Amino acid sequence: MQDLINMISTVGFPIVISVIMAYYVRDQGDKNREDIRSLNEQHKTEMLAVIDALNNNTLALTQLRDSLIERGIANDGNHTD
């Protein structure tokens, strides 16, 4: 505490507060950067699961369409009317 008072006496209150605030901003930036990095990794994992589910659904729909076409219940979308 005495060191802080000596610094204020030597260079002035605004300078000391500016240095303290600069340190605080840098520290917060580092913490936010780590949080964002963690969220990006979590989002990447979630999106891989979504992509896998979407691919599985596409495959299932394609198989269902092919099955319906084979049974003559649906056409293949190629109209020759």
Image (cartoon, helix red, strand yellow):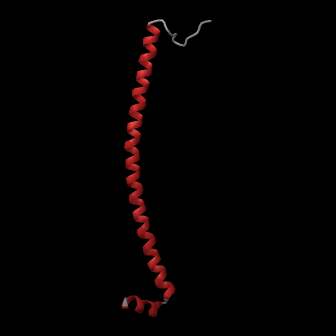
Q: How many marks?
A: 0
**Does 59 sit left or right of 15 as displayed?**
left
Q: Nearest the camera: 9 or 63?
A: 63
**Residue in view at x 47 percent, y 76 percent:** 21
Q: Position of residue 16 (x, y in %)?
A: 46, 84
Of the 4 image quadrants, the one containing the N terminus is bottom left
Image height of 75 relative to 34, above or below: above
Q: Residue 17, relative to residue 35: is it above or below?
A: below
| Residue at point 41%, 92% (across, down) | 6
Check the image and report above or below for 59 versus 74.
Answer: below
Location of residue 58 in the rendering, given as x and y in whole percent from the top left corner: 44, 25
Question: At x 39% / y 54%, what residue is drawn?
Answer: 37
User: Picture coordinates of residue 47 (x, y %)?
Assistant: 41, 40
Q: Residue at x 41, y 22 (%)?
A: 60
Quadrant where the C terminus is found in the figure: top right
* Quadrant in the rendering for residue 63: top left
